[in-house]
C-alpha cells in the first residue's frame, strides 16, 4: 500500500501545514453533507445516503493515510534503541574494510600530507601523539561513514551515522589496542589544557 512521505517525516512541519487546507475542505464538505442529510435521504433514499456515508468514511481514511495531521513520530523523538541499526552480516565486512584502510600506511600518509612537516620529519611530524590519535580517529570514522552510506543508501542519516560510529569504535579500539581509548584521550587532553 502506498503512503505519502508526509507520514515518514521527510517534509516535517511543512507537510502537516500543507495538509491543513485539504483537511479543512474535506471537513467543511462533510459538515454540509451532515447538515443536509435529511433532505438528501428524502430525495435519494436511505440506501444512497448510507452508500454516500461510506464514501465519506473511505475519503477520511485515505486522507489520513496519505496526509495525516498528527503522526506518532511528530510528537516524540526516536529513542537511541530505535535509531540503532539491526544486526547485519554486512557489518563485519564493513569492519574489515575500515580496518584495512586504517592499516594502509599510504592512505594514512596521504591524510597527514596536508599538514606541513617539520624539516626532516615524516608527514604530520609536528603533531603531538594526541593530535595524531585524533587525526586517526577522524580518518577511521570518515571511512566508516562513507562505507556505511555506500552499503546502506536507503537508510536515514541517523542510522548510517550509528552504523559508522559502531564500526569505527570497534576498529579504532583494535587499532589503539585499548578498548577505553576515548577515555584515555580525554584524560590526555585534560592534562594538556
Image (spheres, rainbow, N blue to C red):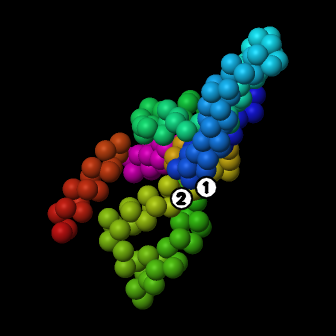
Q: On the rendered structure, is 176 left or right of 68?
A: left
Query: Regarding mark 1 in the picture, which secondary structure is present there?
Result: helix
Residue 118, by quadrant, is bottom left
Residue 146: image tag: 1
Q: Residues within 10 Å of mark 2 (few under 14, many from 20)?
A: some
Q: Which residue is drawn at 42% across and 37% down?
A: 76
- Mark 2 and mark 1: span between their CA atoms? 6 Å
Query: Regarding mark 2 in the picture, which secondary structure is present there?
Result: helix
Which quadrant does the C terminus fall into?
Answer: bottom left
Which quadrant does the N terminus fall into?
Answer: top right
Task: Residue under label 2, please give it.
Answer: 142
Q: Main secondary structure of the magenta part?
A: helix
Residue 127, by quadrant, is bottom left
Tell me if I can see residue 148 in this picture.
no
Pick the residue in front: 192 or 10.
Answer: 10
Q: Residue at x 19, y 68 (%)?
A: 192
Pick the residue in front: 23 or 30.
Answer: 30
**Marks 2 & 1, CB-CB < 8 Å contact:** yes
Residue 168: image location, x then y, percent:
48, 48
Residue 176: image location, x then y, percent:
39, 51
Query: Magenta part of the protein: which range?
Result: 162-177
Residue 92: image location, x then y, percent:
59, 37
Tell me if I can see residue 185 in this picture.
yes
Residue 119, compared with residue 22, is above or below; it is: below
Please, which residue is most extreme toward the top here? 47
Amino acid at each position: 500500500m502506498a503512503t505519502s512521505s508526509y507520514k515518514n517525516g521527510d517534509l516535517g512541519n511543512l507537510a502537516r501545514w500543507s495538509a491543513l487546507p485539504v483537511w479543512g475542505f474535506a471537513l467543511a464538505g462533510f459538515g454540509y453533507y451532515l447538515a443536509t442529510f435529511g433532505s438528501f435521504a428524502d430525495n435519494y433514499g436511505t440506501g444512497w445516503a448510507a452508500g454516500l456515508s461510506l464514501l465519506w468514511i473511505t475519503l477520511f481514511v485515505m486522507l489520513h493515510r496519505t496526509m495525516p495531521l498528527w503522526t506518532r513520530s511528530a510528537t516524540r523523538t526516536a529513542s537511541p534503541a530505535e535509531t540503532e541499526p539491526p544486526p547485519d552480516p554486512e557489518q563485519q565486512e564493513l569492519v574489515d574494510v575500515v580496518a584495512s584502510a586504517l592499516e594502509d600506511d599510504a592512505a594514512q600518509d596521504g591524510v597527514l600530507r596536508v599538514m606541513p612537516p617539520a624539516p626532516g620529519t615524516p608527514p604530520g611530524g609536528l603533531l603531538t601523539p594526541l593530535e595524531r590519535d585524533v587525526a586517526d580517529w577522524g580518518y577511521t570514522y570518515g571511512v566508516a561513514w562513507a562505507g556505511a552510506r555506500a552499503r546502506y543508501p536507503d537508510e536515514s542519516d541517523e542510522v548510517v551515522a550509528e552504523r559508522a560510529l559502531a564500526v569505527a569504535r570497534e576498529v579504532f579500539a583494535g587499532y589503539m589496542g585499548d578498548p577505553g581509548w576515548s577515555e584515555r584521550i580525554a584524560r590526555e587532553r585534560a592534562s594538556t589544557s
